[in-house]
Structures are given as C-alpha cells and as structure tokens.
Image: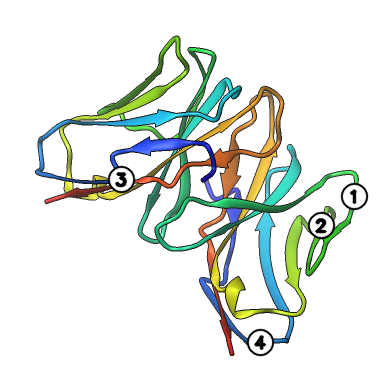
C-alpha cells in the first residue's frame, strides 16, 4: 500500500543553490503534512509542516509547498548549506489517530 | 536530546532469539509510537499506544508485540527473530492531538 512516494533516493546540490525535495501521495484523508530531517546515528527531527488549508509555509531557509489537487508536497531549501546534508522524510497525517505515514527518504548532499 | 529515551542503542543477537526494546517518552507525552526503519523501506509504522491503551496498529508482525506501562514507558518485544528483522527501531512520543511526533535516537538491532 504505497500511499506515499518519495521517488528520489538521493539529491546532490552545490552550497548556496536551491535544494528541492518532493513527495507524492494518494490518500485524500491526509490533512497535515510534515518534513523531518535525519542525521546518521540520530532520530528524525521535525523540520517544518503545513496544514491542508494552506499551500505554502516558510521558516527561514525552508519552505514547504502543498499542491492538493496534484497531491504533491515539496520542500525548498534556499540557500543550501553543507550542514543540511541529511536524509529528509516527508510525513503525512490523516484519520482518527495521529500516526504519521512516511516516505522512504531522500539523502541530500550539499557540496561545499 | 529530544527527551525521548531509547535503550539499548545497539543490540546484536541470533536468529530465533527474543529481545525487548525500551522507550521512555518525553515528560507529559501520553502517546507512544513505534517505527521500524529497514534498508530501503523508510519509516514503517508499527504500533501506537495512548495512556496504556493500544490506539493504532500498522505493519507489525505477529512475532512482535508492545505495551505501554502505567508510568508511560513502552516496550517493544521481538521474538523468533529472523535476519530480516535487522533494522533501526524508533520510538516517538507526543501529547494528545499533536501533529508533530518527537523521536528518540533509535535502537539498532542486528540479527546474525
């Protein structure tokens, strides 16, 4: 049951450029959307989120975009920094409980 | 430190054995979630507890079981272990109704 697809296993960008990470979903019940970042040997940490009533949310260098009609979620990081190198997971919440459904993750490498 | 404590950090065992992973949630969080991260599989939801009661079940094998105790800590029991059970197991916690889960650093299980 592939409700969430994070199709790019890896992405490499130059420092200072934009990083764009993408997720697609199929479940129309999802109403809250999140991005988590994970460094090696650490647990995932919350990065930024957006509710289904909005289409954009910014927090510093990070912006999340939601296109509900296309069922598409993206994360933009501008400018990218080497410390942003990590695995990024998109997470989706919906239904009567509060569990999150995650994508498989994208390994972002920002090269100095 | 996220406030979610998981023990042990690393565990190596043999096929057919049984192990117990422990999680202490953040102070004040009543919900506990267990996730499994296998190679190329992303974060797979296993089970959720709220204040001692099972709230939601995901892709948890019958060989696996969990519980949440009155002091709110949770244990994930994995039995008849197979090579394919080797993975990172994450615990997360949240307050009731929260959209964001806080993850622990994980327990890395290696089955030889």
* x, y percent for residue B56: 53, 24
**First along the sequence among labels 1 and 2:** 1
* Residue at position x 51%, y 46% in the image: B1
* Residue at position x 53%, y 61% in the image: A105
Dot 1 and dot 2 residues touching (CB under 8 Å): yes
Cα–Cα span, label 1 and label 4: 29 Å
Cα–Cα span, label 1 and label 2: 7 Å
Cα–Cα span, label 1 and label 3: 39 Å
Both labels 1 and 2 in a single chain: yes
Which residue is label 2 attached to? Answer: A66
Residue B89, placed above or below residue A80: above
Which residue is label 4 attached to? Answer: A15
Both labels 4 and 2 in a single chain: yes
Judging from the image, mark 4 belongs to the subunit labelled A
**First along the sequence among labels 4 and 2:** 4
Crowd tier of the residue under label 2, counting other residues whose Cα lies within 10 Å: few below 14, some 14–19, many 20 or above = many
């Amino acid at each position: 049951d592939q409700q969430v697809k994070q199709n790019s296993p890896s992405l490499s960008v130059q420092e200072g450029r934009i990083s764009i990470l993408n997720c697609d979903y199929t479940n129309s019940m999802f109403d809250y959307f999140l991005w988590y970042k994970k460094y090696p040997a650490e647990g995932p940490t919350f990065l930024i989120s957006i509710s289904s009533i909005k289409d954009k949310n910014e927090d510093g260098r990070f912006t999340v975009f939601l296109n509900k009609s296309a069922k598409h979620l993206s994360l933009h990081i501008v400018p990218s920094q080497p410390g942003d190198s990590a695995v990024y997971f998109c997470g989706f919440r919906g239904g009567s409980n509060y569990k999150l459904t995650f994508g498989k993750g994208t390994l972002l490498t920002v090269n100095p | 430190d996220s406030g979610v404590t998981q023990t042990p950090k690393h565990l190596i065992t043999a096929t057919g054995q049984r192990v117990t992973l422990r999680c202490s949630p953040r102070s004040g969080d009543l919900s506990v979630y267990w996730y499994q991260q296998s190679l190329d599989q992303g974060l797979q939801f296993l089970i959720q507890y709220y204040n001692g009661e099972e709230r939601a079940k995901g892709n948890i094998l019958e060989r696996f079981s969990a519980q949440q105790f009155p002091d709110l800590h949770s244990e994930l029991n994995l039995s008849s272990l197979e090579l394919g059970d080797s993975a990172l197991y994450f615990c997360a916690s949240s307050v009731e109704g929260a959209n964001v889960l806080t993850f622990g650093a994980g327990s890395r299980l290696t089955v030889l």
